Image (tube, helix red, strand yellow):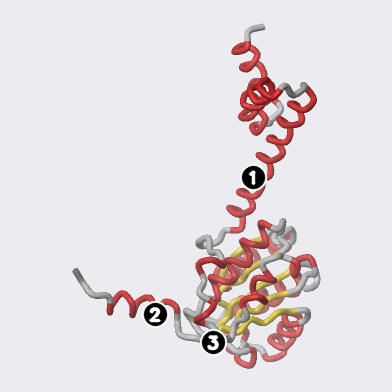
Amino acid sequence: MKSDVLAAQIKLYARELKMPGLSGAFEEVARDAAKAGRGHLESLSACLAAEVESRAEHRLAARIKGARFPSLKTFDTFDFSLLPSLRKNDVLGLGSGDFTRQRENVVCLGASGTGKTHVASAIGLSAIYAGARVRFTTAVTLSQELLAAADDHRLPRYLKSWRSADLVIVDELGYLPLGPGAPLMFQFFAERYEVGSVMVTTNLEFSRWTEVFGDATLTAALLDRLTHHSHVLVFEGESYRFRESAGRLTKPRN
């Protein structure tokens, strides 16, 4: 059988078996094997290794897309020197994702614009690379979705849809009162307790969380669950956004 016909046949088989990695690699593997004098089993192993690598890359891309980060952030683009209260080694340690395997929580606490969302997103992205399943949302969006699910009598199904996540990042808790969504938000966090990790970014000290949830008893119960087995990262420094804006204003014009 001619080599071009055989190659087309292999690609067809690979497509039927849903093995795009093998389809894209076998011709190069065959050429390298011919040059190096490698046997059939070694060549087959190389083709299958290419398929395994391809599937891992697609799985990683799907998890990153499924996390729904507002933008992809990394530790490399964060200036830790501007926040002396934040210990870089502690943050990078969280990036290993070990805390998700221990079902521990993280609270990023600090004023607006100090980089909480950046760090939370970078930790989440790093955890995905370490094998964790991550989902990102804002407190307002989550509250609205919980209320809509409750109104449509599908709250149990909605809550269940989050259970597969090893880490849920809830951004901007405290910027707006939750109102009627507060009890449902408590239920959401209660469902996550010791089942999966939660990371929260907030501009409010714990003593002011009643401003968000309204009920002191509810707030105390939530904090008890959230801060049990938790890491608290304190962001004390000038606003990143203010600094960038000031830099643009003071930059000389050509």
| Residue reaching furthest to the top | 1
Crowding at mark 3 (Cα within 10 Å: few <14, some 14-19, many 20+): some
- Give the amino acid type for the residue marked by disc 2 in the picture: Arg
What's the mark number on residue 134?
A: none
Identify the residue shown where x is 61% and y is 76%. Answer: 88
Rendered position, 225 above or below 158: below
Residue bearing the label numbered 2: 243
Q: Position of residue 202 (x, y in %)?
A: 58, 80
Crowding at mark 1 (Cα within 10 Å: few <14, some 14-19, many 20+): few
Q: Quadrant of residue 146?
A: bottom right
Instruction: Measure the alpha-carbon separation of dots 1 and 3.
Output: 37 Å
Indicate the quadrant containing the N terminus: top left, top right, bottom left or bottom right: top right
Q: Are marks 3 and 2 in contact (CB under 8 Å)?
A: no
Residue bearing the label numbered 3: 236
Identify the residue shown where x is 64% and y is 63%. Answer: 149
Instruction: Measure the alpha-carbon separation of dots 2 and 1.
Output: 37 Å
In this picture, residue 60 sits left or right of residue 110: right
- Give the amino acid type for the residue marked by disc 3 in the picture: Glu
Seen from the viewer's position, the closer of residues 73 and 166 is: 73
Of labels 3 and 2, earlier in sequence is 3
Residue bearing the label numbered 1: 57
Secondary element at tag 2: helix
